[in-house]
Image: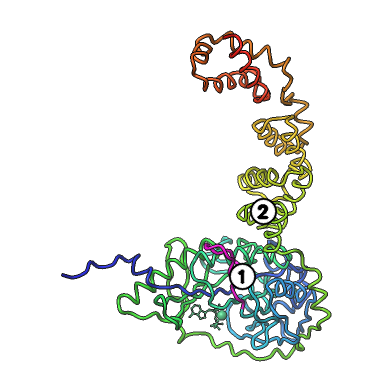
Amino acid sequence: MTAPEASFSERLAGYEPVIGLEVHAQLLTRTKLFCSCANRFGDPPNTRVCPVCVGLPGALPVLSREAVTLAMKAALATHCTVQGESIWARKNYFYPDLPKCYQISQYEKPLALEGWVEIPSPAGEPRRVRLQRIHMEVDAGKLLHEVFPWSGEKSGVDLNRSGVPLIEMVTHPDLRSPEDAFEYLSALKAILRYTEASDCNMEEGSLRCDANVSVRRRGAGALGTRTEIKNLNSFRHVARALEHEIARQVALIESGGEVVQETRLWDAERGETAPMRSKEEAHDYRYFPEPDLAPLRIGDEWIEEVRGTLPELPVERRLRFVDEYDLPDYDAGVLTQSRAVADYFEAVARESGNAKAASNWVMNEVLRKLKEDDVGLEACGVTPQGLGELVGLIEKSTISGTIAKNVFEKMWASGEGPGTIVEREGLAQVSDEGALQATVAEVVAANPEQVAAYRGGKKAAIGWFVGQVMKKTAGRANPRVVNELLRKSLDSDA
Ligand code: ADP
Ligand code: MG
Ligand code: ZN
């Protein structure tokens, strides 16, 4: 008798994926790395160019101090060691978006070495994903294949992006699943945005990721042969591409084949990777030191000065939120994903004096509305003071939670404060017994059958009565007071 064949997912589980990511992030400088052209997205093609960034012969590069400062911020925020000396190198290759035929980069001596980024892990304790290196380089231009009437016959070249400063951040092969990769990218993006080193806008290409992946049998020590996947333009695509590539490699090995070290392209529409180039045709970039630029020397003083400007980072802030506001770790994670949201939450918490309520409102209402309207916090019409005041109104029982949701929608639409809306629309909760007694009596008188049922022992019917009074008062009656009045009326007349 032969054993039944294991399903593919069972066989897949016998392998461990190993992943390393290379992330390119555009730095948020005013100018390009080696010239004074503006670093800005979205201008008409070739309107932000000069002899330096289009690579005219004889034009000399001048390094932007701002770019180095931002790169150092990213390095220090990821616990890397900024090197006292790094060397600019020419990386030579031909491509139509690179008129110089070389990219100025760093190779043997990069800006920073050996750091880490912390990611949450399913088991609880956060894990460190180690960074190998961070180096600086210029971006290339962009080919435009689709936007012009003559597209289809030929392609355009836009050099506005040519010369824009990038940092490349390379991890050790420390990631073990597509989810890990997703968590790492989220954590890295949060850090780069907190430090304002990069806006990490993937649609605009300010953050790009290549993923290296291999598989090995669980328990095996040596790493398997890896492939590198390019063309990943969202975190979801990184995770999906990795899932696909892991399954492809396992299927290949299980069928007696061997993984070939190669670069593969992710095709989002077909949901698969396809070979782009193999190691044999791999580029030889013929790196050599850039003769037009002196080595970059960074003294301790400058490093400490930059370190001093670092804000509280996402991981620290998350821990502090758990500690200081007594929030669940999950909530603290959501609230600290962006610095603006974290600042907003803290302002609401301060204003209202109730951090738990502030957290619920920001997470459930503010973030939901921002997503619905597809806008950032800067476009939010509800100020933290306004929301804090709204939370305060619920605390003081001036309005009910249900009415508050309503008021919030109006605040969002009009930008008015909650006090103004509550007053103008007469939404304040009625807790006054005298004012509510008439309505309670009315409801009791109009429903003899329900009254009989209640008095016959169906005490749960009280909820139905409360509902009737709430309806008649358009939700403004204080349910606690209504409850008391109803009990008095129903129990005493028996
Ligand atoms: P290259 O010089 O070809 O870019 P590197 O050695 O610098 O190669 O590695 C690039 C990336 O690939 C790094 O993020 C590294 O962690 C990752 N990597 C290296 N070996 C493996 C492997 N066997 N499996 C998965 N990832 C790997
Ligand atoms: Mg590489
Ligand atoms: Zn320029």
Q: Nearer the viewer, residue 472 or 33?
A: 472
Q: Nearer the viewer, residue 127 or 5?
A: 127
Q: Quadrant of residue 24?
A: bottom right
For residue 276, the mark is none
Question: Residue 125 lies in magenta, yes or no?
Answer: yes
Q: Residue at x 66, y 51 (%)?
A: 327
Please give the count of numbered marks on the rendered protein: 2
Q: Tell me the kind of residue under disc 1.
A: Lys
Q: Tell me the kind of residue under disc 2.
A: Leu
Q: Mark 2 and mark 1: span between their CA atoms?
A: 36 Å
In the picture of the structure, the residue carrying the numbered disc 1 is 142
Where is residue 409? Give x, y as percent: 67, 36
In the picture of the structure, the residue carrying the numbered disc 2 is 335
Q: Image height check: is 428 above or below 134?
A: above
Task: Report the magenta residues as a range.
Answer: 118-131
Where is residue 132? Give x, y as percent: 61, 80
Q: Residue at x 62, y 68 (%)?
A: 118
Q: Residues within 10 Å of mark 2 (few under 14, many from 20)?
A: many
